[in-house]
Image (cartoon, helix red, strand yellow):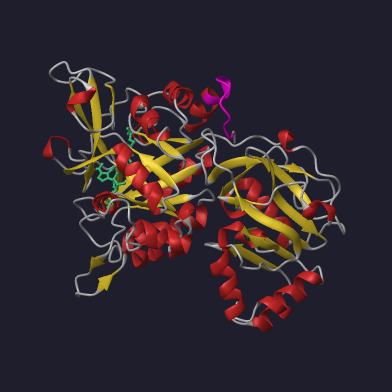
Amino acid sequence: MTGPEDIGRASRLLFPGVGAFGTAMEVLKRRELVSPLLDYLQAGRPFLGVCLGLQLLFEGSEESGGVEGLGLVPGAVRRFPPAPTRPVPHVGWSGLAAAPGVPLLAGLEESRFYFVHSFRAEAGGPAAAAGWEAACSDYGGAFLSAVARGGVHAVQFHPEKSGEAGLTLLRRFLAGEAGSAAPGALPAAAAAPPLARRLIACLDVRSNDAGDLVVTKGDSYDVRPGGGDVLNLGAPAALAQRYADEGADEVAFLNITGYRESPLADAPMLALLRAASQRVFVPLTVGGGVRALTDGAGVAHSALDVAAAYFRAGADKVSIGSDAVAAAEALLAAGGARSGASAIETISAVYGAQAVVVSIDPRRVYVAAPGDTPHATVRAPRPGPAGEAWCWYQCTVSGGREARDVDVVQLARCAEALGAGELLLNCIDEDGQGNGFDSALVGLVTDAVGIPVIASSGAGAARHFVDVFNATGCSAALAAGIFHRREVGIDEVKRCMHGAGIATRLC
Ligand code: 1PR
């Protein structure tokens, strides 16, 4: 898209939206796109809005109070109300209850689609009376997951990240399948498959001694067992594709040497993301080195520059580790006053909270009694070296090499306050051990925040996923070693979850 005149000339208009409502409207106005866009939409010409591309069709949004939207669809977009059992953003794979008369969605009612958003239009509002409601989903109440009229469609989910079902929808749009003047009556949202608990495959990536970018995996973060070569468990892009094909709901790449090298100079890592995003149609998270840095030529780059490079290469979310601990320390020292300058804040302001994950690398510190430390304690999953029955979780930086006087609850709350949309909660003690997730740790953190938490470290069997989902409110569980070594299949975990009555996306 280069200018307003291109809109009138388009035969199809795909409008993916990223970022905040107010910023997006500002850009549309500055580039004089509002009026040609409205002409195109009012003529009912082929249009597909995605995520923010749906919300902008409404009259306004609570996200940017006072900013008018395009106003094509009556009603306003509001934030999901907070609830202890429903973290916001709403992230993951949810189903649709679709109205008849929308060919784009026909027959896809059994599928789940990938959503990531904090704001939504409620079903049954003014859009219903105007005949726009095409599908709804349930998250503490029915919200509109699709609107349609004639050739104009918009979906709240991301078809480009929704595997085969999403690709089917996109193919239909490109083939020109338009609907009737207005969809039929909307079924109850309860008919839609609910939000699934997610299964994430994680690839720790770094260059090995021969200079090849490889997937590696150690125990308790040691990827050179016995001081030898970096363990090589495969080629990252091929493994990512295998996991997506086998049903992983997301794939995460952690650039584990990013904390000491500039990710902007790491061409193979960026090339890997580009290659993966061309063949993997589920969300991709990338972490490692997201912080302000000065490159070898003495040029300063902000954390936002690093994140932008990752997003341009195909990442959907960036994950911040070491820099988040520094930001939490600064926030605690300032008595909770935000500087606005941290990586979390700057990236979240531009790309939205849903694009910012904070990766936490804690290690247990054992104590005899909770009163022995000012930090938040739990009963230790197993006794400490001197038989201690309690522990707290100390945050680390630089891949676990350096511990800081910040505990997981402090870091999790600071990350949420600064604008992170999700937490990736590792546990160095359990990493690679295969004994199961540390549910005490996961429960401690999920109870402390209102954003989704990904449980990580320690999976050794399919039932370990069931255990952590049953024991805690975590939204997703992540594993690495068991998948890389083919000890447990992704489908096996999904079937085990399904058998235990846990909502999951079966492929
Ligand atoms: O600090 O912003 O540069 O980010 C660095 C990122 O790299 C962090 O997310 C940090 O967790 C990660 N990282 C750094 N060093 C290592 C290492 O292993 N030496 N890997 C590392 C972290 C842990 C998990 C692992 C799970 C599941 N890997 O991601 O995949 O524990 O493993 P399992 O299922 O085999 O038990 P920054």
Magenta region: 497-505
Q: 506 or 453: nearer the eye?
A: 453
- Please state if 418 lies on the left or on the right of 402 as rendered: right
Residue 69 location, quadrant: bottom right
Name the residue rendered at 38%, 63% in the picture: 346
Q: 452 or 74: nearer the eye?
A: 74
- Please state if 21 lies on the left or on the right of 13 as rendered: left
Residue 126 location, quadrant: bottom right
Quarter of the image where the C terminus is located? top right
Name the residue rendered at 24%, 30% in the picture: 392
Q: 54 or 199: nearer the eye?
A: 54
- Please state if 414 lies on the left or on the right of 14 as rendered: left
Name the residue rendered at 62%, 46% in the picture: 164
* Spot occupied by residue 50 in the image (x, y as percentages of width and height): 63, 58
Would residue 488 be counted in the magenta stretch?
A: no
| Residue at the far front in the pictured view | 335
Q: Is residue 203 visible?
A: no
